[in-house]
Amino acid sequence: MPELPEVETIKRGLAKTIIGKKIAGFDSDWKKMINRPLPEYKKIVAGQEIKAVERRAKMLIIDLTGDWRLWFHLKLTGQLVFSGKKKKVVGGHPIKEGFEKDPNRFTHATFTFTDGSHLYFNDVRKFGWVRLYRSGELKEKLEAMKLGPEPLAAGFTLSVFKERLKKKPNNKIKVFLMDPQNIVGLGNIYSDEVCFFARVRPDRPVKSLKENEIKLLFQGIKKILTEAIKYEGTSFSDYVNALGEAGAYTKKLKVYQRFGQKCFRCGGTVKRMKLGGRTSHFCPSCQK
């Protein structure tokens, strides 16, 4: 599943392409992907203009005129494809047909714009969704999720981070970092990298953290996410950026998916363990 840097990259790519476009029509062949009857979707979005493309946690929000919002979650295998006469923008799971043919057998929602271009939502496993809400309704939905702060927002300070850590003293450090009710956007990849940066084992309890380790974790969150956005995310099997290209941050990873290889910092061997149902990578020599 794309994490914060990947979704932010998709958001920026789409924002350059679809803002200002007017929707002529909508269609979907998968009723679980949408939250209203299809005829209602068609009626509401027709004639709406795209005002903004935003991100909250790992989700995308498209602002429409008339106080309506489209709320997207790509989940495990979702892909958004903008297709125009001279330009194609792709973000999300790398579906080969999503580059070469559109629409295709994985296309389950289609927005048609008045200029003849399209925004396709492709999804191999059909876990992704696009919801349509008034802005007030969407605000209530997001509040009900009790999402934590955006880690790159100015309001996410060291003191805020410390207060959140105090509320979950028995959490394993990596489990804490991956919980979106604590901090949003950190998944399996970047939580491994943040723990490595701070030189802490991912399976240690939060209450064991020393003051300097808390500061390093905080600095690592800011630094690594910022750098990952700069390099447009990480790619293995589940992500391409808004131009349909692999995220270049893969080459910057220090421990994630490096099991059995030498640690770049100390020369030890990168190990792995199961933690919170996920495979975690760490260096036992320099992470204590």
Image (spheres, helix red, strand yellow):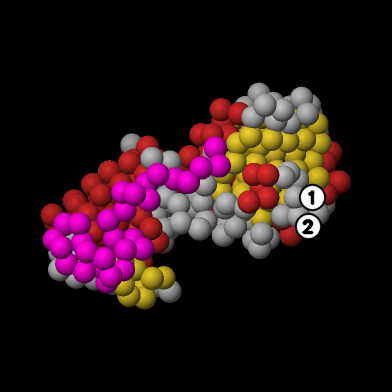
Camera-side residue of 144 and 157: 157
**Residue 278 figure quarter:** bottom left
Where the C terminus falls, by quadrant?
Answer: bottom left
At x 73%, y 36%, the residue is: 118
Residue 35: x %, y % from top left: 73, 53
Count of marks overlaid on the render: 2
Compared with residue 151, is residue 49 higher up or lower down, i.e. above or below?
above
- Check if residue 31 falls in the magenta segment: no
Q: SS at mark 2?
A: helix
Residue that numbered label 2 is attached to: 31
Q: From this viewpoint, is residue 269 visible?
A: yes
Q: Residues within 10 Å of mark 2 (few under 14, many from 20)?
A: few
Instruction: Tell me where residue 25 appears, x and y as whole percent.
Output: 81, 36
Is residue 267 located in the magenta-colored stretch of the structure? yes
Query: Is the Cβ of the residue at disc 2 closer than 8 Å to that at disc 1?
Result: yes
Residue drawn 19% across and 52% down? 216
Residue 225 appears in which quarter of the rendering? top left
Mark on residue 206?
A: none
Q: Nearer the viewer, residue 37 or 33?
A: 33
Question: Hey, which residue is sitting farthest right in the picture?
Answer: 39
Q: Is residue 130 visible?
A: no
What residue is pinned by disc 1?
Answer: 28
Rendered location of residue 231, percent (x, y): 38, 40
Residue 129 vs residue 83, the one in the foreground: 83
What secondary structure is the magenta-colored segment mainly? Answer: loop
Which amino acid type corresponds to the residue marked 2 in the rendered image? Lys
Q: Look at the image and give the residue range highlighted in magenta.
A: 243-271
